Amino acid sequence: MSADTIPSDSLKSLLRYRQRITRMQERWQRLIPSYTKVQYAGNMGLISIGGGWSYGRNRQWETDLLLGFLPKYDSDAAKATLTLKQNFMPWKWHLSESFHIEPLACGLYINTVLHNDFWVRQPDRYPKGYYWFSTRIRTNVYIGQRITFKIPQHKRLFAKSVTAFYEISTCDYYILSHVGNSGYPLHELISLSFGVKLQIF
Amino acid sequence: MKKLKFRQLFPLLLFALFSTSCELIDYHPYDVHISGTTDVNATNIARIENACKGKRQIRVAVIGDSHRWYDELRIFVKNINNRNDIDFVIHDGDISEYGYTKEFLWTRDILDKLNVPYVALIGNHDCLGTGCDSYNAVFGPTNFGFVAGNIKFVCVNTNALEYDYSEPIPDFNFLAGQVGNNITLHSVGVMHARPGDDVFNNNVAGVFHYYLTQLPGLMCCINGHGHTLRHDDLMGDGVIYHQTASLDDRIFLLFTFNDNGTYDYEEVTF
């Protein structure tokens, strides 16, 4: 059978089908993380590894999903943590062809410890309203800076750029602990962390 | 322009950061990553037992429920250091508010500035998250006893609700061991929550009290948790439970224990 013998409404439906599939695939494709990230310290584990998505007109927004590892130290078991992190980098300064810095990165992240000894809400055994806070969920805020090296096109393997960053953060506990106390130096309130991001596409 | 700004800002910031970076690295609030002195109670008990050897009168300052009142804790330390009539200090529990590791270190570092030795008991807040592990690492076992002069101080973990039956709280095996140790003439029972409190295992409140009364010459009991000063004959047998106030009230209890089995107490504001 030659092509011109295919009935036109059958062709139309085939076309609609192709369009739908393409749209669906495009939508799912957005879920592919556009970078991977490794971060050291920052109240979410010794080391956290994960990926995330860059978006926005200048890709000034980022959302990370990180799995953290917390060694045992003097506790009874090593722990895993999970972090959802929202980043915002309003400016980009180009230093050269291959380098640019983001003079300000800021954001918020929520961390949870994956361990039975921690709770979101106090267990039933306690009298009502005994502990108002959650031992499992910590909210952190940070500011930091980043420097990015753009990998030349002919040298790219898995990533198009490498970003090194540092962040200064604080978490809800640190703030709560120091409200009403005058005697503590700033370094007890804030934490420093470092990381590397590999931008895949 | 932009390059200039960067060159001025970046190295400066980095320098400021790295010069203090070690203190700034935090893995997790509940990481139980301990720095500084550990086994605080054991070390201080050795000091207490040594210094009080042969003493006929022991003077003890007791505080509790310091939670996150660090300013008040510092004022307390200064106050005690300005006196020279106190043999040692007892903190009867709730060293922390949320049970995270640094809270134990902060409280320890402030109390370490005392000129006299101190011991700290575990409170219910100190059991939250990995709090127990931090307490164990920094201060030691949650049940302990020591001798000052000829008085035995028996310090018991009574925060049953926090352990949810995973461990025997209060630990009667520990108490039985203390009862059997007839090395002193007189005793004092110390705990965070007292019988009848919400975190106490009240099914054994009477038995617990009975065990304490089996200690040689029990003079009185001391507890925290209630946040208000109280002196109650809880079981109607003449054994008084002295309850310390929370630290924001800026009152400590000053006990004078005599080797003839009498004692006196004073509420001292600071």
Image (tube, coloured by chain):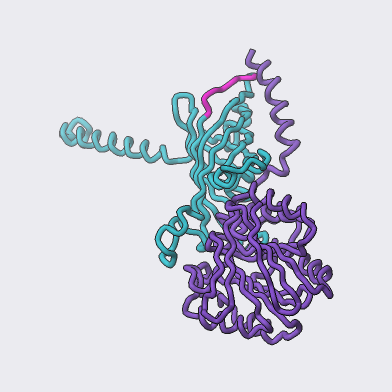
Chain colours: A cyan, B purple
Residue furthest to the top? B1
* Viewer-nearest residue: B55 or B165: B55
Which percent across, then down, holds residue B226? 52, 63
Picture quarter with the N terminus of chain A: top left
Which percent across, then down, holds residue B258? 74, 74
Relative placement, left or right, of B159 versus B135 is: left
Q: Quadrant of residue A165?
A: top right
Residue B130 appears anywhere in the view: no
Magenta residues (range): A89-95
**Which is the main secondary structure of the residues drawn in magenta?**
loop
- Residue drawn at x 61%, y 81% is B212
- Residue drawn at x 63%, y 64% is B92
Relative placement, left or right, of B50 versus A195 is: right
* Viewer-nearest residue: B27 or A120: A120
Which percent across, then down, holds residue B142? 64, 70
Q: Magenta stretch: residue A175 in it?
A: no
B248, above or below A94, in the image: below
Residue A97 appears anywhere in the view: yes
Q: Magenta stretch: residue A92 in it?
A: yes
